[in-house]
Image (spheres, grey):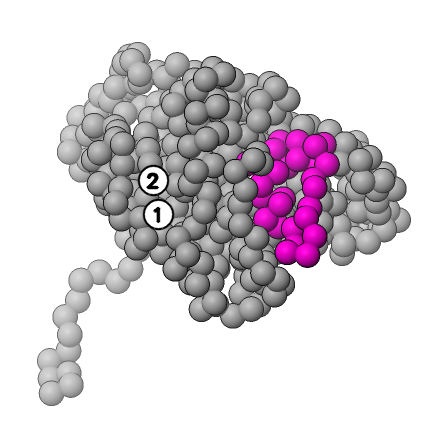
Amino acid sequence: MTQNGIATLNLGDGKEAIELPVISGSMGPDVVDIRKLHAKSGVFTYDPGFLSTASNKSSITFIDGDKGILLYRGYPIEQLARQCNFTDVCYLLMYGELPNESEKNDFNKLVTSHTMLHEQLVKFFSGFRRDAHPMAVMVGVVGALSAFYHDALDISDVTHRELSAVRLIAKMPTIAAMAYKYNIGQPFIYPRANLSYAENFLHMMFSLPTEDYKADPRIVRALDRILILHADHEQNASTSTVRLAGSSGANPFACIAAGIACLWGPAHGGANEACLHMLEEIGDVSRINEYIKRAKDPDENYRLMGFGHRVYKNLDPRSTLMRETCHEVLNVLGLENDRLFKLALELERIALEDDYFISKKLYPNVDFYSGIVQRALGIPTSMFTAIFAMARTIGWVAQWNEMISDPEHKIGRPRQLYTGTVQRDVPAGYHQ
């Protein structure tokens, strides 16, 4: 981070111009440092949704939405998804570098050693209704972890932060799978030390006491890729929520529970589930033009889910990888003629040839295909966002740890543009 010139702000009305530093990062646009703006001028900036505001500095993830670039610690997502497994990416996001063979083995053993839940915490599940949404269960159970693992809650201690991070990464698949098993009334399946991260999750989801589940390596690889593609995505809503919660000094389990709650929203983690519902609603290729017409009609409050992105104004690099994965999974499972996948491909083709979508750069995003992949794997739609949370946990803990380590970090306290009633007096004699 280096200063790269001065921006001059002229507020008019005879006020003196304000000079503000312009700061450059290693990549991406320069930013105007407005930290002293109010002290110098008495005014704030107004930026709903933080469309033009950097709330922090970070060295973890970089996105160039215009060029369709996504980097984790400098590595292109395409290379990581094709050449690494999920725990490699976890190590990279946590420590800044890809692990060598020794580091890889040690990290895998460390994560595996923390996959079990405290047995009293397992009983926590029985307090939920059987039909509770898995995300509701995850918010509660993850938040409760601090009551069982309070031996490492000193956030000023680097080793405590690392242990809590590893516990969260390791236990999230166990919690997600248990939420699913509880939902369908099947007994919990415990994690096994001889399975990989993705394989262990599939084992806990689909094994039964009466019969074991052996996942096809190609299916394991597909899930691994889903996790990698969702591991981090810069300062999105849930990551910003984790950082904001963490800025108050809250324990990491509470912060991640807050992130899960934010991710639950249909405009964020629930988007892939919404895409699947949209495809089911369209139902047949013959009806695609009808829905495209609705999406283009300014008088219709309708949009095609899975097209366009807040950040990407070009093709989402994750969607290309997810499309490949979708083909691979459907081929492995003999579902090449899957009705929804064929519908998705045709919808994509027609939309990308339409001037309206081209002019607005509404390209398919990662959510467009990820729901179809998970559906093919036998994962119910209610679990889609839970798996997203499982993947994003590493991004959340890496971002949280980075924030706590930053000597410049302060408690989050956004300003506001007040539009309410001006000061007034309570009428004399009121309620006397």
Q: Is residue 40 above or below residue 123?
A: above
Tell me, for residue 253, which label it has, or none: 1
Q: Residue at x 47, y 54 (%)?
A: 138
Q: Residue at x 75, y 36 (%)?
A: 329
Q: Residue at x 22, y 34 (%)?
A: 157
- Residue 224 in the image, given as x and y percentages of width and height: 61, 33
Q: Disc 2 residue type?
A: Ser
**Quarter of the rendering containing residue 413:** top left
Q: Residue most toward the front?
A: 210
User: Which segment did they paint magenta?
Assistant: 197-225
- Residue 396 in the image, given as x and y percentages of width and height: 41, 38
Foreground: disc 2 or disc 1: 2
Q: Which residue is mark 2?
A: 164
Residue 199 among those drawn in magenta: yes
How far separated are the C-alphas under marks 2 and 1?
A: 8 Å
- Residue 74 in the image, given as x and y percentages of width and height: 47, 17
Q: Is residue 373 above or below residue 426?
A: above
Q: Nearer the viewer, residue 181 or 235?
A: 181
Q: Secondary structure at mark 2?
A: helix
Q: Secondary structure at mark 1?
A: helix
**Quarter of the rendering containing residue 415:** top left
Asked whether the residues under the numbered discs 2 and 1 touch, taking CB atoms below 8 Å apart as contact, a structural biologist would say yes
- Residue 149 in the image, given as x and y percentages of width and height: 31, 48
Question: The N terminus is located in which quarter?
Answer: top left
Q: Nearer the viewer, residue 283 or 36?
A: 283
- Horizontal side of residue 406 vs 40, given as left or right: right
Q: Is residue 12 above or below residue 185?
A: above
